[in-house]
Image (cartoon, rainbow, N blue to C red):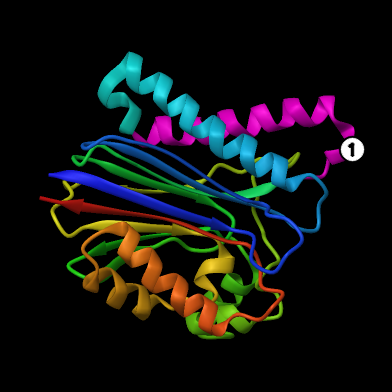
Amino acid sequence: MKILVNSICKQGGRDYNQDFVAYDATDTDACLVVCDGLGSYMGSEIVSRLCASKIVETYRLVKETDGDRAFTPELSRAYIQTAHNYALGFKEQNPAIRASCTTVASVVTNLKQTVISHIGDTRAYLFRGGRMLFQTRDHSLARAAVDLGQIPLSGIRDHKDQNKLTRVLGSDYYIAPDCEIIAEPLIPGDGFVICTDGFWEYVYDEEMEADFAASSAPSEAITRMEARLLSRCGKRNDNYSAIIAMVVD
């Protein structure tokens, strides 16, 4: 078995791109990271880049020195907290962007164990046999409305508080990421979509399932999903980014 990876990171209809994707992948292991800087805070495109890059850099260093520990939930949380601390240090030296922050979603796997971590509304999905097995829960007021039974899950996309987040990375108040541990080994046909809200807002869950099942490579799945996105979005659509990974024979 091996892991195939591809990614997309587009400006959309905005003046600049605050999304950033980073990954380190071999045939048998991967660290996949997507960040989305908050548009209303100056410099968030810098923080999203710093955090995504630092997570992958820290993962790579741990993997080189400590092998299998690189894929534990403790280390996955540590990668993200290291990125948070790094961003705070950078902002202290650059006070003009003091309020900047980002969301993050990451997948770390060695095929035997997988850890999915996230902060904010950048999502990670796990697919098996063309069906979605897992989806992260947004840290947003819209998701809170779902949990309270006020709206259905499908109503998040159109909710007035969809972009009001209850947890972010790089702010003064750090809350650790939620982590989902997939203890069973991955098998051929398994895969991940890690994406920003500018992506999942226009590509629905059932469509991800269909496109994933119909594609033999991540690049093909991305092409299918982006076509759906572009058929729906307006001229001023948000930045949109995704990493797609597939486990193949």
Vertical side of 33 occupied by 89: above or below = above
Q: Is residue 199 left or right of residue 125?
A: right
Is 157 within the magenta? no
Badge 1 amino acid: Ala
Vertical side of 186 occupied by 151: above or below = below
Q: Is residue 64 left or right of residue 18?
A: left
Is 83 within the magenta? yes
- Outermost residue, top side: 65
User: Observer-nearest residue: 35 or 184?
Assistant: 35
Vertical side of 23 occupied by 168: above or below = below
Q: Position of residue 139 (x, y in %)?
A: 58, 60
User: Observer-nearest residue: 209 or 27?
Assistant: 27
Q: Is residue 192 visible?
A: yes
Q: Quadrant of the N terminus?
A: top left
Please tell me which residue is depicted at 34% across the width and 14% down the height of the picture. Answer: 65
Please tell me which residue is depicted at 52% across the width and 83% down the height of the picture. Answer: 231
Magenta: main secondary structure equals: helix
Q: Dot 1, how many residues are within 10 Å of its Cα: few (below 14), some (14-19), or many (20+)?
A: few
What's the magenta region? Answer: 72-100
Please tell me which residue is depicted at 64% across the width and 53% down the height of the picture. Answer: 167
User: Observer-nearest residue: 116 or 130?
Assistant: 130
Q: Which residue carries the number 1 mark?
A: 96
